[in-house]
Image (spheres, helix red, strand yellow):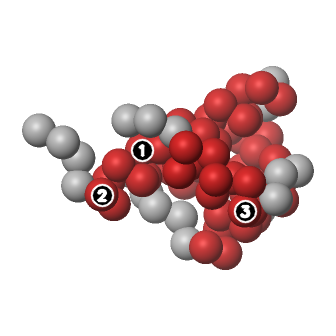
């Protein structure tokens, strides 16, 4: 059964963030610290258990040193 649209976006968002984090060789704890987020929340985002607000997505983009628009673009281009 296909995911509902919100769940699909959360899944793709988490996958993109994890991929970018892995490319940098960072732990969830390191990314969470750079983005000023809780490490357990970071895990929830990556597992699609939480959908970040636009402000939180911006914090993640800044921490990952990518424009927010690029991060969202990658999420949109990601396949389920």
**Does residue 9 appear left or right of residue 6 in this picture?**
right
Going from N to C along the chain, the mark reached first, 1 or 3, is 1
Mark 3 neighbour class, 10 Å CA radius: few under 14, some 14 to 19, many 20 or more? few
- Indicate the quadrant containing the C terminus: top left, top right, bottom left or bottom right: top left
- Could you say which quadrant of the image residue 30 lies in? top right
Q: Which residue is mark 2?
A: 5
Residue at figure coordinates x 11%, y 38% from the top left: 1
Q: Position of residue 34 (x, y in %)?
A: 83, 52
Answer yes or no: do the residues labelled 2 and 3 have beta carbons within 8 Å?
Answer: no
Secondary element under disc 1, as helix, strand or loop, is: helix
Q: Which mark is residue 69?
A: 3
- The residues tagged by marks 2 and 1 sit, at their Cα atoms, a distance apart of 10 Å
Secondary element under disc 3, as helix, strand or loop, is: helix
Residue at figure coordinates x 30%, y 57% from the top left: 5
Going from N to C along the chain, the mark reached first, 2 or 1, is 2
Seen from the viewer's position, the closer of residues 29 and 4 is 4
Mark 2 neighbour class, 10 Å CA radius: few under 14, some 14 to 19, many 20 or more? few
Q: Which residue is mark 1?
A: 11
57 vs 73: above or below: below
Mark 1 neighbour class, 10 Å CA radius: few under 14, some 14 to 19, many 20 or more? many
């Amino acid at each position: 059964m296909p995911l509902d649209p919100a769940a699909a976006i959360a899944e793709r968002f988490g996958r993109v963030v994890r991929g970018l984090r892995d490319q940098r060789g960072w732990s969830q704890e390191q990314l969470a610290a750079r983005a000023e987020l809780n490490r357990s929340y970071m895990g929830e985002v990556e597992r699609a258990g939480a959908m970040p607000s636009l402000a939180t997505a911006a914090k993640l983009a800044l921490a990952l040193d990518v424009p927010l628009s690029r991060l969202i673009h990658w999420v949109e281009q990601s396949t389920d």
